[in-house]
Image (tube, rainbow, N blue to C red):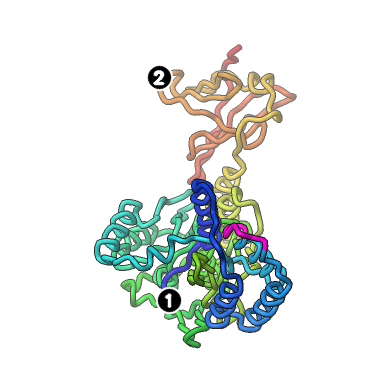
């Protein structure tokens, strides 16, 4: 099974397209052989569905519905597919098991295919999309950050891009891999990317296929990626959109205690699924296999990957950074090092201007502080270096008296008896300078 797919999305889109096609026709007068269709559905489930006992229960119920003549009055194939789906769900609800009407599907299957041309087109499209790698950067605190939105099926073609990304962050002290927008892809790519991040050959998740009754083991192996051995602490960001192969990666790394998962519970799709034509234009998407982790002896189907630290998806990056900084703080060897880490922790608290900071307070900070000028513009605070001859920076609030300037210095206004007297500047390497307020700007 070489590719996970977002079958729910495909099913919805197919249903919508089928509905629009049928609407465009004057009238759909197709005669559907109900008994033949139900038999075909049951046979497809019996041969392929990953849960044989469930396929038997579904078959018995659908046959009982035929005997009750429940489908006799339904002539619209789209409505029939929806009704059968509802009946299946009443016996066993599986997010990947779905039936829909798409008469073009079998026609497309019969068309002659020119695989090399199709493959070249797909590879080119993936290459233009940088094989779904969207961001690679070094965050404050020497943290490597990588975001990619799918696990490409083209490992050979994508390898230079992936290797370059991991080489770029190879000197960092921790890694964050952002899967919050990752909808899945190839389990073989899961194995490949995992190989950059383990010290020795490591077993990930297995995939058991019902029809062949075979289990494929997936092992991450650093020898396959030039033994990069990126073994620094690893954090994986997740959301409800994290699905399928992305869950595979997060689950395997978490189960092996290689990564800390931060964010929201994932989508819960652990069963590779494939479309099976059942005749008369109907298609049934059937989970053909299932993932099994050798440590947990289960998977994330229906439950999703449960984060080690649960938070809203939008807060996951900051939460991961906070965890990294706090861990570094535990091992800091000097006050200077602790001061620099504390600076990083404070910077995470930065936010946009809100109602907690009134204009009167901002105006009290205005003035000259040695060679710096602080002023208010459009209800926001700015600092001007060299009294207007240098650079200007927006000061973003951390607290009502504490601000972040750019991403490399912070300012804290100090008061005596309610009057602002000093401005303390601190940089992320740990330096601190205090400037006296020499003049007030009204």
Label drawn at residue 142:
none
Instruction: Please report the bounds of the magenta region as a residue range.
Output: 73-79
Q: Give x and y (percent) for residue 296.
A: 61, 80
Q: Residues within 10 Å of mark 2 (few under 14, many from 20)?
A: few
Residue 170 drawn above or below residue 387: below
Q: At 71% from the left edge and 26% from the top edge, which residue is drawn?
A: 416
Asked which secondary structure carries label 2, the reply is loop
Residue 178 drawn above or below residue 279: above
Q: Which residue is mark 1?
A: 220
Residue 290 picture quarter: bottom right
| Left-right relation of 269 to 62 | left
Q: Give x and y (percent) for residue 173.
A: 46, 60
Q: At 40% from the left edge and 19% from the top edge, which residue is drawn?
A: 389
Q: Quadrant of the C terminus?
A: top right
Q: At 56% from the left edge and 19% from the top edge, which residue is drawn?
A: 377
Q: Give x and y (percent) for residue 185.
A: 45, 64
Residue 131 drawn above or below residue 40: above
Label drawn at residue 389:
2
Residue 68 picture quarter: bottom right
Contact flag, marks 2 and 1 (Cβ < 8 Å):
no
């Amino acid at each position: 099974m070489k590719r996970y797919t977002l079958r729910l999305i495909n099913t919805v889109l197919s249903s919508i397209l089928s509905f629009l096609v049928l609407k465009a026709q004057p009238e759909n007068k197709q005669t559907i052989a109900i008994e033949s269709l139900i038999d075909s559905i049951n046979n497809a489930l019996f041969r392929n569905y990953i849960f044989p006992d469930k396929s038997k229960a579904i078959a018995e119920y659908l046959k009982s519905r035929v005997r009750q003549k429940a489908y006799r009055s339904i002539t619209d194939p789209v409505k029939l597919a929806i009704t059968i789906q509802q009946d299946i769900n009443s016996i066993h609800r599986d997010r990947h098991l779905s039936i829909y009407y798409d008469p073009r599907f079998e026609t497309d299957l019969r068309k002659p295919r020119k695989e090399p041309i199709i493959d070249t087109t797909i590879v080119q499209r993936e290459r233009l999309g940088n094989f779904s790698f969207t961001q690679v950067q070094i965050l404050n605190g020497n943290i490597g950050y990588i975001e990619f939105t799918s696990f490409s099926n083209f490992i050979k073609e994508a390898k230079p891009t992936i290797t370059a990304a991991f080489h770029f962050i190879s000197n960092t002290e921790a890694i964050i891999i952002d899967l919050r927008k990752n909808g899945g892809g190839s389990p073989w790519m899961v194995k490949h990317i995992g190989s950059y991040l383990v010290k020795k050959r490591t077993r990930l998740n297995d995939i058991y296929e019902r029809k062949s009754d075979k289990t494929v083991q997936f092992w991450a192996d650093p020898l396959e990626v030039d033994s990069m051995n990126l073994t620094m602490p690893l954090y994986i960001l997740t959301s409800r959109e994290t699905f399928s192969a992305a869950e595979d990666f997060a689950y395997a790394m978490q189960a092996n205690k290689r990564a800390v998962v931060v964010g929201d519970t994932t989508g819960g799709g652990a069963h590779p699924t494939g479309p099976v034509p059942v005749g008369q234009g109907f298609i049934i998407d059937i989970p053909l296999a299932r993932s099994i982790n050798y440590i947990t002896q289960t998977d994330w189907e229906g439950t999703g990957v449960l984060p080690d630290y649960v938070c809203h998806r939008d807060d996951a990056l900051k939460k991961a950074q906070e965890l990294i900084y706090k861990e570094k703080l535990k091992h800091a060897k000097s006050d200077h090092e602790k001061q620099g880490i504390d600076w990083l922790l404070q910077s995470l608290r930065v936010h946009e201007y809100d109602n907690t900071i009134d204009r009167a307070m901002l105006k009290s900070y205005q003035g000259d502080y040695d060679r710096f000028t602080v002023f208010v513009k459009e209800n926001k605070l700015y600092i001007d270096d060299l009294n207007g001859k240098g650079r200007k920076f927006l000061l973003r609030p951390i607290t009502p008296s504490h601000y972040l300037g750019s991403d490399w210095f912070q300012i804290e206004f100090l008061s005596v008896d309610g009057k602002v007297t000093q401005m303390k500047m601190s940089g992320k390497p740990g330096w601190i300078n205090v400037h006296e307020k020499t003049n007030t700007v009204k």
